[in-house]
Image: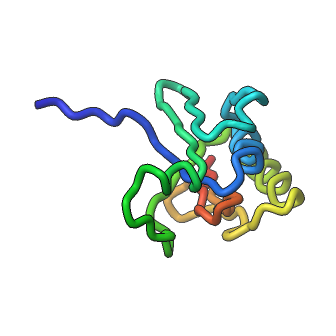
């Protein structure tokens, strides 16, 4: 049996707000998707899916609101300067900065922001 990762799915309260955030991280998402309940895009061979929580509640039986941080999505940037600039842009737009950019002992520049739904998103360079 062969198992392959098919996609990463993200559940969102407000599609337009979420997609605006992920566009700033480099995902190419058409503006027409802002009104969708399910959106899929491909980036470097990986599929990202976005579903509104209202639509997911209709599929899952006994939906429970997630609590805590359960996954890490990490976005690679070209340089330390690019990371700092993306972090600045996101936080200026009101996205929660969780961990300000810093150089880590393992050699990466690293920061964490919260997406509009409270997921922790890592930025690395």
Between residue 11 and residue 85, name the one nearer to us.
11
Using residue 55 as the reference point, say whether residue 3 is left or right of it. Answer: left
Q: Quadrant of residue 3?
A: top left
Residue at horizontal 57%, vertical 38%? Answer: 38
Residue 93 position within the rendered picture, expressed as x and y whole percent measured from the top left: 87, 56
Between residue 61 and residue 120, name the one nearer to us.
61
Q: According to the image, what is the colour scheme of the structure?
A: rainbow
The residue most toward the bottom is 67
Residue at horizontal 70%, vertical 46%? Answer: 15
Using residue 40 as the reference point, say whether residue 70 is left or right of it. Answer: left
Residue at horizontal 84%, vertical 62%? Answer: 94
Is 33 above or below relative to 91? above
Residue 47 position within the rendered picture, expressed as x and y whole percent measured from the top left: 49, 31
Is 26 above or below relative to 124? above
Using residue 89 as the reference point, say whether residue 65 is left or right of it. Answer: left
Residue 16 position within the rendered picture, expressed as x and y whole percent measured from the top left: 76, 44
The residue most toward the left is 1
Residue at horizontal 67%, vertical 69%? Answer: 99
Quadrant holding the N terminus: top left
Between residue 7 and residue 81, name the one nearer to us.
7
The residue most toward the right is 92
Residue 88 position within the rendered picture, expressed as x and y whole percent measured from the top left: 84, 56
Q: Give the number of callouts.
A: 0
């Amino acid at each position: 049996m062969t198992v392959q990762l098919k996609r990463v799915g993200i559940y969102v309260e407000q599609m337009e707000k979420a997609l605006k955030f992920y566009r700033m991280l480099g995902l190419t998402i058409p503006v027409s998707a802002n009104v969708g309940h399910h959106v899929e895009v491909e980036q470097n061979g990986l599929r990202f899916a976005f579903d509104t929580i209202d639509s997911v509640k209709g599929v899952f039986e006994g939906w429970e609101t997630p609590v805590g941080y359960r996954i890490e999505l990490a976005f690679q940037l070209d340089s330390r300067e690019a990371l700092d600039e993306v972090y600045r842009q996101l936080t200026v737009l009101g996205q929660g900065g969780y961990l300000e950019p810093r150089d880590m002992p393992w050699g990466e520049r690293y920061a964490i922001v919260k997406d509009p739904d409270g997921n922790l998103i890592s930025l690395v360079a």
